[in-house]
Image (cartoon, grey):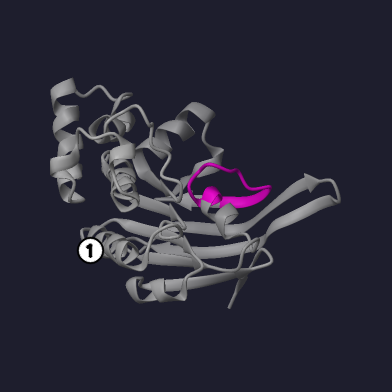
């Protein structure tokens, strides 16, 4: 069953040299429970496509359907609610708040919910346990290794129990051992039912995914 359907999506930007076509007539379906890799060279459009898929970047033309919801037809407030309910993001630079502990960083997405504070803390601690950081929940980001910071970012992405995780070059700044541990964690999350979509340029990462699609010059390659 297709959870995500991309129909005739384009994305253009106005630049100093005129119009830049970042995405050119993209059609793509992603099944529920799939672990998909978006592959391509720098500047190919893969991060732009990821941002469109995640509800962050409206296409110039075309339609994005997630769970039969026309995402970009939603009003802005409802679109924000949709992202909060359906998706989690893991960025290459982690984007942790430096003066908050690991636990407090993971709590951030729960701040806008109506759950009691005690339940929020229990949920945050549970996902930190899941990513192997149960003993480091009170440490600040600068007291954690790069791999541990990445795990905090993953815990923050999954604390709201989203259906889809989007990851943009999550292993790009990690050594090979830490990258493998991260991909093992992604695979475990995928096996638990999460749909995973990962931008990567590393061919070695393909052994962890269920399917890869390639994009070049804004066009998906057959």
Q: Quadrant of the N terminus?
A: bottom left
Image: 10 above or below 142:
below
Give how far across and how far down residue 126 sits, in percent. Answer: 15, 41
**Residue positioned 63% across, 48% down in the render:** 59
Compared to residue 102, the image places residue 116 above or below, namely: above
Q: Going 22% across and 62% down the picture, which residue do you hit?
A: 188
The quarter of the picture where the C terminus appears is bottom right
Where is residue 120? Give x, y as percent: 19, 28
In the rendered image, residue 106, in percent from the top left (x then y), is placed at: 28, 35
Report which quarter residue 187 is drawn in.
bottom left
Disc 1 secondary structure class: helix
Residue in view at x 41 percent, y 66 percent? 36
User: Magenta includes 182?
Assistant: no
- Magenta extent: 51-63
Farthest residue to the right: give it.
Answer: 17
Q: Position of residue 206 (x, y in %)?
A: 40, 74
Task: Please tell me which residue is depicted at 36% across the width and 70% down the height of the picture.
Answer: 209
The front one of 215 and 33 is 215
- Please give the count of numbered marks on the rendered protein: 1
Q: Is residue 41 left or right of residue 123?
A: right
Question: In the orientation shown, which residue stands out farthest toward the front?
Answer: 143
Whether the magenta-drawn stretch holds residue 55 is answered as: yes
Q: Taking 75 as reference, is 25 left or right?
A: right
Q: Nearer the viewer, residue 27 or 44?
A: 44
Q: Residues within 10 Å of mark 1 (few under 14, many from 20)?
A: some
Q: Which residue is mark 1?
A: 191
């Amino acid at each position: 069953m297709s959870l995500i359907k991309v129909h005739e999506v384009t994305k253009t930007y106005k630049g100093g040299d005129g119009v830049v076509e970042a995405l050119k007539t993209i059609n793509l379906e992603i099944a529920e429970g799939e672990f998909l890799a978006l592959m391509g060279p720098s500047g190919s459009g893969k991060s732009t496509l990821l941002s469109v898929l995640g509800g962050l970047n409206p296409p110039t033309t075309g339609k994005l359907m997630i769970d039969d919801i026309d995402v970009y037809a939603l009003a802005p407030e409802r679109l924000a609610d949709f992202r909060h309910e359906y998706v989690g993001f893991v960025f290459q630079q982690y984007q942790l708040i430096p003066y908050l502990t690991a636990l407090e960083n993971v709590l951030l997405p729960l701040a806008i919910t109506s759950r009691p504070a005690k339940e929020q803390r229990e949920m945050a601690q549970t996902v930190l346990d899941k990513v192997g950081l149960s003993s480091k929940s009170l440490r600040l980001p600068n007291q954690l290794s790069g791999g541990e910071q990445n795990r905090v970012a993953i815990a923050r992405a999954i604390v709201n129990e989203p259906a889809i995780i989007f990851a943009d070059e999550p292993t790009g700044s990690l050594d090979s051992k830490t990258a493998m541990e991260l991909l093992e964690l992604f695979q475990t999350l995928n096996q638990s039912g999460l749909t995973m979509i990962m931008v990567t340029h590393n061919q070695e990462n393909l052994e962890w995914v269920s399917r890869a699609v390639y994009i070049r010059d804004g066009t998906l390659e057959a």
